[in-house]
Image: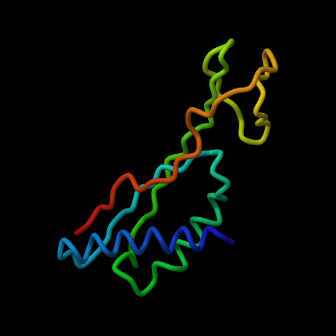
Amino acid sequence: MHEAAIVQGLLDIAIGEAIKHGSPRINRIKIRLGAFRGVVREALEFSFAAMRHGTLAQHAVLEIETIPLRVQCADCGEIELSPRDFSLLCPQCDEPVAILAGREMQIEYVDLD
């Protein structure tokens, strides 16, 4: 489960920021997660709940904003697709598409005490 490794990275960054700013507690970590990133949200939430214990983030909430998969076809323009139905071809004209959004994984903010 690579979600545990992702959570460890999130906690490392958030704890580093808390220490840098002299904060005794992390209240919330908000991330932006693309729908086409290949991360299972439930596994990420489970890992966060298990791994935050005994850290400055022990009582923190993980907020996840899901960014939908959007692609652009040179002929048809911008299209929003479901990652489950995704193909690198436009569903309207069968031409190749470019991914515009949906692969993000970034920390939006860390709320400290």
Q: How is the image coloured?
A: rainbow
Q: Going by the image, does 28 lie left or right of 104? A: left
| Residue name at image x 51 percent, y 53 percent | 105
Q: Quadrant of residue 90?
A: top right
Residue 96 rendering spot, x and y as whole percentages: 74, 26
Q: Nearer the viewer, residue 40 or 105?
A: 105
Q: Nearer the viewer, residue 50 or 87?
A: 87
Residue 5 rendering spot, x and y as whole percentages: 57, 73
Residue 111 rendering spot, x and y as whole percentages: 29, 61
Looking at the image, the residue that sits furthest to the bottom is: 54
Q: Going by the image, does 23 lie left or right of 78? A: left
| Residue name at image x 38 percent, y 83 percent | 55
Q: Is residue 85 above or below residue 56?
A: above
The quadrant of the picture occupied by the N terminus is bottom right
Looking at the image, the residue that sits furthest to the top is: 75
**What is the total number of numbered labels drawn onto the structure image?**
0
Q: Quadrant of residue 27?
A: bottom left
Q: Is residue 83 above or below residue 41?
A: above
Residue 101 rendering spot, x and y as whole percentages: 56, 36
| Residue name at image x 51 percent, y 79 percent | 51
Q: Is residue 27 above or below residue 106?
A: below
The quadrant of the picture occupied by the C terminus is bottom left
Q: Quadrant of residue 100?
A: top right
Q: Nearer the viewer, residue 22 or 59?
A: 22
Q: Going by the image, does 10 lie left or right of 15? A: right
| Residue name at image x 68 percent, y 13 percent | 76
